[in-house]
Image (cartoon, rainbow, N blue to C red):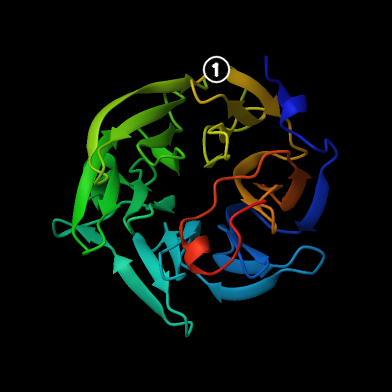
Amino acid sequence: MTGLSDILETTEFERVATGFVFTEGPLWHPAGFFHFVDIRSSALYRMTLGQAPELVRKTQGGNGTTFDMQGRLINCEGDGRRVTRTEHDGTVTTLLDRFDGKRLNRPNDVICRSDGSLFFTDPSLRVPLAEREIADAAVYRIAPNGVVNAVANFEYPNGLALSPDERTLYVANTRWSQYIHAVELDTSGVAMRRRIFADMSSDATNGVPDGMKVDAAGRVFCTGTGGTWVFAPDGTRIGIIETPEVAANIAFGGPDLRTLLFTASTSVYTLRVKTPGLPHPWYKLAGRPAAS
């Protein structure tokens, strides 16, 4: 049976940056650096490992990040209640802030499918009732042509990830019931049915189901209580990677995509793993090797 020793190449964490309030939104750029955010400071950073992080820009509560298929940075900005796109010249465009004419709640995490569609979570719990224009918390899809539809409603949708074949959308549910949902998608990315993929409930309080990534073997990594939980493709729990601080999100990076970066409270840490993470679909278009 597979255990964490089959997954981790190293077990000693390296703290590569510290001094923040609440780090989140890690993302590898094939040019050789990571993006991440400090939510509480509304700051977006870029960091080459071994060097000090550089401030890219201030955000409106920036959280989850991804790239679109043109390599432009997409960012969920919770305080601004919007999803933004940073153009190649640095200009920031509001990609979406309303659905059916109503203001979004608090966009949290976002991912990109190889057809160019974007999926993002929009939990409602942290928006005062009097300020909510959309009653339900949901996952939304922005199609390549810009059409937006609600994929499904959830209690508190947070982190997102796609399976290697992009036919399963994983959604972490953070509050009340703690679990990962698996939403089956058709070939065009439309939801067909869903099920519980994994139970992440715990009596402890050091962390909740949050950021997720998938490796090339289809294993699901999700930050949660006590560390980052690792699941086999069938939902069997393999183990929990215990981090020095409570981790909110993770990202695979490095030229071989085998450096696992943890955004953990005040700091950022790395570990080396044996299996690369799934590459962002834009990486191949960028002319960079996906993994080795």
Viewer can see residue 36 = no
Q: Residue at x 64, y 69 (%)?
A: 46
Task: Please provide percent x and percent y for residue 28.
Answer: 61, 59
Crowd class of label 1 (few under 14; some 14 to 19; many from 20; radius 10 Å): some
> Which residue in the structure is indicated by mark 1?
236
Viewer can see residue 290 = yes
Question: Dividing the picture into quarters, in which one does residue 101 lie?
Answer: bottom left
Q: Residue furthest left?
A: 100
Q: Residue at x 52, y 38 (%)?
A: 210
Question: Dividing the picture into quarters, in which one does residue 29 lie?
Answer: bottom right
Task: Please provide percent x and percent y for residue 167.
Answer: 35, 37
In the picture, measured across the screen, residue 285 lies left or right of residue 39, that is left
In the picture, measured across the screen, residue 241 lies left or right of residue 159, that is right
Q: Amino acid at mark 1?
A: Thr
Q: Residue at x 18, y 59 (%)?
A: 147
Which quadrant is home to the N terminus? top right
Answer above or below: position of 149 versus 194.
below
In the picture, measured across the screen, residue 14 lies left or right of residue 67, that is right
Answer above or below: position of 131 versus 190.
below
Q: Residue furthest right?
A: 12
In depth, the one of 181 and 45 nearer the eye is 181
Answer above or below: position of 239 versus 289.
above
